[in-house]
Image (tube, rainbow, N blue to C red):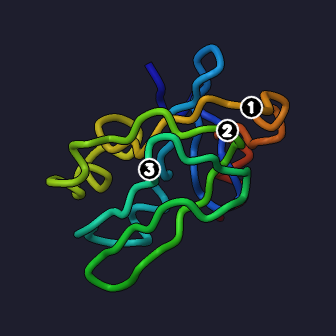
């Protein structure tokens, strides 16, 4: 089970939790607080190829639209279908029920270049 503590973070506020060759991806609790009340999420398509740092998703809140970037390269294998009707799950539980999508990772070394929680928290202060 992924938690804030055992996830890795991109500078752009996405987290990834790697199990085997599949990474679950979401946005950090800090990011969801900054975005505000989420009202819509345009998720990537299953089967879509993404590259680390590539815009692949958009989160819309009552105050803005925010691009979400893939923290790792690979193929999107699953999206969180619950977010289509309950996008606010990201606000409620960014590291639980509010995950965004899963990627079958094609470049596992990219995971090691992401920050741990302590480094990420230091970067947002």
Label 3 to label 1: alpha-carbon separation = 17 Å
| Mark found first going from the N terminus, 2 or 3 | 3
Q: CA distance from mark 1 to mark 2?
A: 5 Å
The front one of 77 and 113 is 77
Residue 45, placed above or below residue 1: below
Residue at the image position 72 percent from the left and 58 percent from the top: 53
Q: CA distance from mark 2 to mark 3?
A: 13 Å
Q: Give the vertical position of 55 relative to 16 (above or below).
A: below
Q: Residue at x 69, y 41 (%)?
A: 118
Q: Is residue 53 above or below residue 109?
A: below
Q: Secondary structure at mark 1?
A: loop
User: According to the image, label 1 marks what residue?
Assistant: 106
Name the residue that disc number 3 marks.
45
Mark 2 touching mark 3, by CB under 8 A?
no
120, above or below 37, in the image: above
Question: Residue 40, percent across and down?
Answer: 27, 67
For mark 3, does the 10 Å Cα neighbourhood hold few (<14), some (14 to 19), or many (20 or more) residues? some
| Secondary structure category for the residue under label 3 | loop
Residue at coordinates 21% horizontally, 43% vertically from top-left? 82
Marks 1 and 2: CB-CB under 8 Å? yes
Where does residue 74 sit, x and y in percent of width and height? 67, 38
The residue under label 2 is 74
Q: Residues within 10 Å of mark 1 (few under 14, many from 20)?
A: some
User: Depth check: 121 or 21 in front?
Assistant: 21
Percent x, y for residue 15?
A: 57, 44
Q: Residue furthest top?
A: 20
In the picture, residue 103 is in which quadrant? top right
- Name the secondary structure under disc 2: strand
């Amino acid at each position: 089970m992924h938690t804030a503590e055992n996830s890795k973070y991109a500078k752009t506020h996405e987290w990834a939790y790697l199990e085997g060759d599949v990474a679950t991806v979401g946005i950090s609790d800090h990011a969801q607080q900054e975005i505000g009340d989420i009202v819509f999420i345009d998720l990537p398509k299953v089967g879509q190829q993404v590259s680390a740092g590539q815009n692949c998703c958009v989160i819309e809140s009552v105050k803005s639209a925010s691009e979400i970037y893939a923290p790792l390269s690979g193929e999107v294998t699953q999206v969180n279908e619950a977010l289509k009707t309950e996008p606010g799950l990201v606000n409620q539980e960014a590291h639980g029920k509010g995950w965004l999508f899963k990627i079958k990772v094609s470049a596992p070394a990219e995971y090691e270049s992401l920050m741990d929680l302590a480094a990420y928290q230091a970067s947002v202060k």
